[in-house]
């Protein structure tokens, strides 16, 4: 998922929502599918709780794991180019 804005994310993005489903396992599968549809490949479920008609779930999509090539290291150079032409 190439994006200039994602280059500025230091580590990860969290997405929290309520999904209508019958149990926590179905909810986990749904949130992982959703994150994949959004273009994220490296995802963990960090919280999930079944409540009534579904689950409250938080997923974390890692943009950069420790030791990755960090996109944000070049952000200062990019900002200088934009501001000074």
Image (cartoon, rainbow, N blue to C red):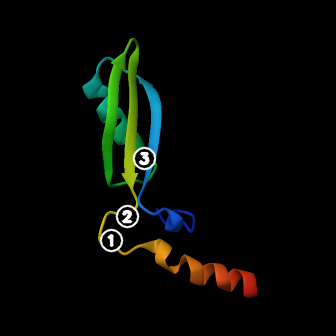
Indicate which disc residue 64 carries.
2
Residue denoted by label 3: 37
Q: Position of residue 82 (x, y in %)?
A: 70, 81
Which circle's residue, 3 or 1, is located before the other in the chain? 3
Which circle's residue, 2 or 3, is located before the other in the chain? 3
Per the image, label 1 sits on a secondary structure element best described as: loop
Number of on-image labels: 3
* Quadrant housing residue 56: top left
Horizontal side of 7 relative to 29 (left or right) equals right
Q: Dividing the image into 4 quarters, which one contains the C terminus?
A: bottom right
Q: Position of residue 1 (x, y in %)?
A: 46, 62
Horizontal side of 5 relative to 80 (left or right) equals left
Is residue 85 something that shows in the picture?
A: no
Q: CA distance from mark 3 to mark 1?
A: 23 Å
Per the image, label 3 sits on a secondary structure element best described as: helix
Q: Is residue 4 above or below residue 33?
A: below
Check if mark 3's residue and mark 1's residue have beta carbons within 8 Å. no
Q: Is residue 79 above or below residue 65?
A: below
Q: Position of residue 2 (x, y in %)?
A: 49, 66
Indicate which disc residue 52 carries.
none
Q: CA distance from mark 2 to mark 3?
A: 19 Å
Q: Nearer the viewer, mark 2 or mark 3?
A: 2
- Residue 46 or 35: which is nearer the viewer? 46
Q: CA distance from mark 2 to mark 1?
A: 6 Å
Q: Is residue 64 above or below residue 57?
A: below
Residue in the image at 33% along x and 19% along y: 50
Q: Nearer the viewer, mark 3 or mark 1?
A: 1
* Quadrant housing residue 64: bottom left
Residue denoted by label 1: 68
Residue in the image at 45% along x and 26% along y: 18
């Amino acid at each position: 998922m190439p994006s200039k804005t994602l280059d500025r994310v230091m580590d990860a993005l969290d997405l929290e929502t309520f999904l209508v489903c019958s149990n926590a396992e179905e909810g986990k599968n749904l949130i992982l599918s959703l994150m994949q549809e959004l273009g994220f490949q490296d995802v963990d479920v960090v919280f999930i709780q079944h409540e009534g008609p579904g689950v409250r779930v938080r997923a974390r999509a890692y943009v950069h794991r420790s030791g990755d090539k960090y996109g944000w290291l070049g952000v200062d150079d990019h900002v200088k180019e934009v501001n000074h032409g």
